[in-house]
Amino acid sequence: MTRGPRERMVYSAAQLIRTQGVSGTGMREVVEHASAPRGSLQHYFPGGKDQLVREALAWSGEFAAGRVRRYAAAAPTPAGLFAGMVAQWRDQFRDEGFAAGCPFVATTADVVAGNEKLRQAVCAGFETWLRPVEESLREMGVPEARCRSLAMVMISALEGAIVMARAQEDVAPLDAVVAELGPVLDAARE
Amino acid sequence: MTRGPRERMVYSAAQLIRTQGVSGTGMREVVEHASAPRGSLQHYFPGGKDQLVREALAWSGEFAAGRVRRYAAAAPTPAGLFAGMVAQWRDQFRDEGFAAGCPFVATTADVVAGNEKLRQAVCAGFETWLRPVEESLREMGVPEARCRSLAMVMISALEGAIVMARAQEDVAPLDAVVAELGPVLDAARE
């Protein structure tokens, strides 16, 4: 672990938000989780909790986008990409349990209605994730007019299935979206 | 408004959770929102916040299930039912803005990982909502083997699109899931 305290705090904030939401995550808890020195929060994040959450969301968007590019390269069909995106969550739930969900969903759920800057940060995070999905679909032969629409369907279905899987403690919703949407996505190619 | 303080508090809890999450919603705020007398919370909900949240989730599940039955009767095709379910949210966002989302998503996001009873309550709420969707699909001619799977896809896609729409302050994700999934749902009939 060669990451510095700043990077560790951004990562820890993302992980804690995924499990407890933004309102449920205290700043002191982030510092402890990151094994960062006291006082480092004010030093690195003069904008306070909002700045830390914004950076955690940006980090999460880049992480998700990187995964999309990796899955698209490994299985270059629309159904293959979607199966990869869903399998990431299926594997996580199997290996680590159902405690952690998506930080974009968590932030939307408890603070977006009352915090315009965090709303914009979630919106930007979704955009960072949507873009490589759209681009991959285009490269795979999906008509221009449906690339954004299908990217939204893929991420919406995955996000909803993650929530339902956590509530049920069962990966059945993830399996359902892959089984039902895979053929539809492949059929969208010209 | 002839509802008593007990019913009003359950309703108010659901509405506040939809906007702020469970961690972000205080008990005193629920009493104020419901215009309920002080002390009525302990009187009606001796189990405290958890009991109130559980009842708000059960109420929400019944509300969603009632809507499903209404939409299925009004437009008795799989695509028609799904369009009705999504239009409910589209209309709400248009008329009331993007402040409020789904209480099941909100509760999953911030407390499910650490509260087994609330996890079970969200799980039961989803089940109350899934059941009439499954039954409607069956009555509409969808093969038995795909009814639950497609019901999960419909609710997952709707839930994810609600989150994305709130973050973007744009109903485009709702329009995308209806446009892309409607034909797929109708084609599932035998």
Image: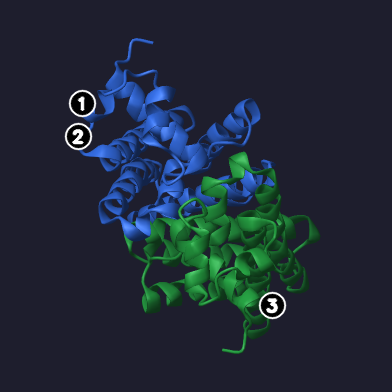
Chain colours: A green, B blue
Q: Choose top left, top right, bottom left or bottom right for residue A144.
A: bottom right
Along the horizontal axis of the image, is A188 left or right of A79? Answer: right
Chain for disc number 1: B
Q: Quadrant of residue B34?
A: top left
The three-letter amino acid code for the residue at tag 3 is Arg
Placement of B57 over or under B6, stated as above or below: below
As drawn, A41 above or below B135: below
Label 1 sits on residue: B43
Q: Are marks 1 and 2 in contact (CB under 8 Å)?
A: yes
Q: Residues within 10 Å of mark 3 (few under 14, many from 20)?
A: some
Q: Nearer the viewer, mark 1 or mark 3?
A: 1
Total labels drawn: 3
Tell me the crowding category of disc 2: few under 14, some 14 to 19, or many 20 or more residues within 10 angstroms, Cα based.
few
Residue appearing at x 39%, y 60% in the figure: A166
Chain at numbered mark 3: A
Viewer-side residue, B64 vs B13: B13
Image quadrant assignment for residue B58: top left
- Whole-angstrom CA distance, mark 1 to mark 3, is 55 Å
- Residue appearing at x 31%, y 53% in the figure: B119
**Which one is closest to the eye, mark 3 or mark 2?**
2
The residue that appears at 63% across and 45% down in the rendered structure is B165
Q: Position of residue B11 (x, y in %)?
A: 38, 27
Percent of width and height locating residue B17: 44, 39
* Three-letter code for the amino acid on which mark 2 is drawn: Pro
Mark 2 lies on residue: B46
Question: Which residue corresponds to the image point at 38% horizontal and 30% vertical from the top-left?
Answer: B28
Give the position of the N terminus of chain A as an image quadrant: bottom right
The circle drawn on residue A69 is 3
As rendered, which of B162 and A84 lies closer to the eye?
Answer: B162
